[in-house]
Every structure is written in structure tokens, then in C-alpha cells.
Amino acid sequence: MISSDLEQSKRRIRADKKRARRQLAPSQQKRASQQLCKRIASSLTFITAQRVALYWPMGGEISPLPLLKHPTARHKQWYLPVIDGENMQFFRLKPGDRLQHNPFGIAEPEHRQVLPIAGWQLDMVIVPLVAFDPQRNRLGMGGGFYDRYFALRPGVIKRPILMGVAHECQRAEKLPLEPWDVPLQNIATDQRWY
Ligand SMILES: Nc1nc2c(c(=O)[nH]1)N(C=O)[C@@H](CNc1ccc(C(=O)N[C@@H](CCC(=O)O)C(=O)O)cc1)CN2
Ligand SMILES: Nc1ncnc2c1ncn2[C@@H]1O[C@H](COP(=O)(O)OP(=O)(O)OP(=O)(O)O)[C@@H](O)[C@H]1O
């Protein structure tokens, strides 16, 4: 087994960090999410972004949802990931939209526009992650959805800005890198920027 060392190390880090974030008390979760959203809301990336994708949190993930109600966010258009088999697309989320659960138990918009938005039309994507390191490397749930979605983005194009978000306790010293890993422009936690 050639891949075993790397795979094993990724498996271990995923298990560790999923446990760490699930163990945060509801009050800690709430406070962390508020701190995170305050940090993001004061960033130029967010202030100037018109079309922003975020995610519906699950399993102890830090919640980006307070951003939806932030005073500076009133004129933004919001998008959520929708998965279909191995594919992921982003669909518009409007106030009052009904949501439904996908097979992973993650909420998605129930009634969708016919076509998803094209990735390059998004200004900013708030990217969930399981673990990160100070070099802004990311380890996700293991489905490869975000890596595949952004794989086609040519290096010269800076749009959308990919902003990873996490609890500070999801920081790892150094993550094993895969050739397909898509770099994040920055990572925000409840504590600081990376
Ligand atoms: N909130 C959120 N939405 C997201 C992602 C994410 O990481 N977080 N994704 C980022 O790619 C995509 C979904 N990716 C996923 C990939 C794997 C599993 C999964 O393996 N779930 C297992 C066990 C969950 C666990 O270990 O905690 C399962 O449902 O059995 C779930 C989602 C799109 N939407
Ligand atoms: N650009 C790509 N082209 C083809 N396959 C890919 C690509 N990116 C990722 N994959 C596949 O996805 C699988 C999962 O990748 P990885 O373990 O890096 O996921 P992840 O980044 O943790 O997950 P996610 O992005 O869903 O949160 C890999 O085994 C790989 O085969």
C-alpha cells in the first residue's frame, strides 16, 4: 500500500479535529462564531464582495451564519453548496427560502434556480475545513468537493477569494499536502487571521 502513510496521517488528523470541534460547549460555539463573523465582516474582501458563498454548519463546524444578518451585508447575494453525487454547485439563498437536508444531513436550498452560479461569478467563498495549518493548507471532510470545484480555476484569476474558516482548535502543526489541494487566500478563526 503506497498511500498508507499519508492516508493514515490524514485520517488521524481528521478524527482528532472533528472531535475537538464537537467537544466545544454550545456557549463556546456561539461566542466563537460571533468573533469569527466580526473579524470577517471588517475585512475588505467581505466588504467589497457582492456575491458570497457560505456553508450551513454541521458537526461542530464554526458557524458563518451570523454574517447573513450583519448590517454591512444587506445588499449581498448569498449562495450555498448543493451536492449531487460527486458534484458540488452553488445556488442562491434568499431570505425565507425553505431548506432541505442532503444525504449528509446538511441543509440546502429546496427550490433552486434552474442554473447554478458559475464559480467565477462569485466574489468570495467561505470554505469549511476540518483542519488547517499556519501555511493556509486545508484538510476537508475527505469528499474532495471544494478541491474538484476549484481545480479548474486558472492561477492568474484571483476570483473568487477562497477564505477558510475554523475554530482555532482545528489548527494543526503541518498538514500533509496533496497535488490537487487548492490554496486558500486566507483563513479566519475565532482568534486571528492566517
Ligand atoms: N457544512 C458543510 N457543508 C459542506 C461541506 C462541509 O465540509 N461542511 N462540504 C465540504 O466538502 C461539502 C459536503 N462534504 C461532505 C463530505 C463528506 C461527508 C461525510 O463523510 N460525512 C459522514 C460523517 C460525518 C463526520 O464524520 O462527522 C457521514 O455523513 O456519514 C460529509 C460532507 C459540501 N457542503
Ligand atoms: N482536482 C481533482 N481532480 C480529481 N480528483 C480530485 C481532485 N481533487 C480532489 N480529488 C479527489 O477527492 C478525494 C478527496 O480529496 P481530499 O482528501 O483532499 O478531500 P478534502 O479536501 O479533505 O475534502 P473536501 O474538499 O470535500 O472538504 C481524493 O482522493 C481525490 O481523488
Image: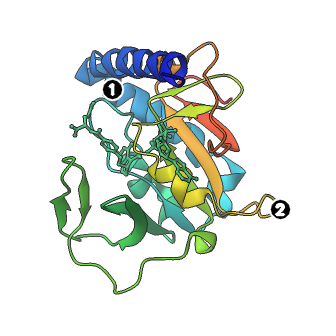
Residue wearing tag 2 = 156
For the residues bearing labels 2 and 1, Cβ distance under 8 angstroms: no
Q: Could one spot residue 40 in this view of the protein?
A: yes
Residue 62 sits above or below residue 82 on the image: above
Mark count: 2
Quadrant placement of the C terminus: top right
Residue in the image at 57% along x and 33% along y: 138
User: Could you say where residue 103 lies in the image, as x and y percent from the top left?
Assistant: 18, 52
Most extreme residue toward the bottom, as rendered?
Answer: 114
The residue sitting at 44% across, 66% down in the picture is: 78
Tell which of 5 and 158 is nearer to you: 5
Q: Between residue 24 and residue 164, name the one nearer to us.
A: 164
Q: Residue furthest front?
A: 1
In the rendered image, residue 104, in percent from the top left (x then y), is placed at 22, 47
Q: Secondary structure at mark 1?
A: helix
**82 vs 142: above or below:** below
Question: What label sits on residue 103 in the rendered view?
Answer: none
Residue where numbered disc 1 is placed: 29
Q: Which numbered disc, 2 or 1, marks the residue closer to the eye?
A: 2
Which is more N-terminal, label 1 or label 2? 1
* Residue 181: quarter of image: top right
Name the spot of residue 41 as percent of width and height, x first.
57, 48
Q: Is residue 192 found left or right of 146 in the rendered image?
A: right
Q: Which residue is at a point 33% across and 63% down the rendered structure image?
A: 82
Give the Cα separation between the discs numbered 2 and 1.
37 Å
Q: Position of residue 7 (x, y in %)?
A: 47, 23
Horizontal side of residue 166 vs 111, given as left or right = right
